[in-house]
Image: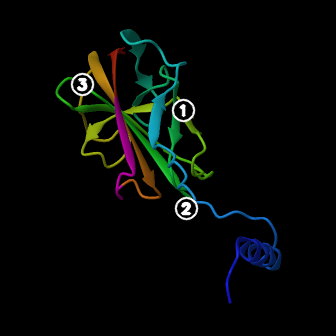
Amino acid sequence: MRLTSQTLLALSMLLTAACGGGSSISGPTPMPTPTPRSIALGREMPSSGSTLSLGSCGFGTCSRALAYKFLVTFDVTIRDPVFRLRLTDDDGTECLSAYQLDLLPVIAGEPHIFAGQTLLLSTTPPARPGVGIPNCEPPFTTTTIATELHDTEVTGPILLAQEFAVTYHWVR
């Protein structure tokens, strides 16, 4: 039996109809571009070089002068996110810190805002807020904001970290 071009065309049309119509075969499906992991500094924060005040918060020395806001994007969902913020001096000593536990998950690929206003004066040992010897005595200057994203446990692995060169002068 000899196959002619007409026979091949008829056979091709029959197979196409039997297999569900005119779908064409294409190459492999491209992988989606992964969502980047990032922490961005909010624009509403005081400008670098600002002088900010420290005071008593009833449980130690703290500041409510720095209303902070960070936009976090992560490529997988984090069900119980914890955001840690540390302000350090030129030597890397942690002078002020804050923790933010969020009841809402960080959804994969969607921006998530961590915002707050209270920073505690960091002490050694860091047993409880306001207890211990202050790491930095006012007046002092911080030059770096270090941020960390954790899942549930602050002592657990750091999922994402970012540092920002921002200088603040702290006074009582």
Q: How crowded is mark 3: few (under 14 residues within 10 Å), some or many (20 or more)?
A: some
Residue type, mark 2 in image: Pro
**Residue 12 sits above or below residue 105 on the image:** below
Residue type, mark 3 in image: Asp
* Left or right, 79 with reference to 120: right
State how far apart marks 2 and 1 are (Cα). Answer: 46 Å
Mark seen at residue 116: 1
Q: Tell me which label, 3 or 2, sits earlier in the chain.
A: 2
Query: Which type of secondary structure does the marked residue at label 3 adopt?
Result: loop
Q: Which of marks 3 and 2 is in front?
A: 2
**Residue 42 sits above or below residue 122 on the image:** above
**Residue linked to disc 3:** 89
Q: Tell me which label, 1 or 3, sits earlier in the chain.
A: 3
Which residue lies at the image location 68% right of the left edge and 90% below the top edge?
Answer: 1
Mark seen at residue 146: none
Q: In which quarter of the image is residue 9?
A: bottom right
Which color scheme is applied? rainbow
Which residue lies at the image location 30% right of the left edge and 26% below the top edge?
Answer: 144
**Residue toward you, 38 or 13:** 13
Query: Which type of secondary structure does the marked residue at label 1 adopt?
Result: strand
Which residue lies at the image location 56% right of the left edge and 58% below the top edge?
Answer: 79
Q: How crowded is mark 2: few (under 14 residues within 10 Å), some or many (20 or more)?
A: few
- Which residues lie in the magenta part? 155-163
Give the x, y percent position of residue 166: 35, 19
Which residue lies at the image location 68% right of the left edge and 81% below the top edge?
Answer: 3
Q: Residues within 10 Å of mark 1 (few under 14, many from 20)?
A: some
Q: Is residue 162 magenta?
A: yes
**Residue toward you, 94 or 161:** 161
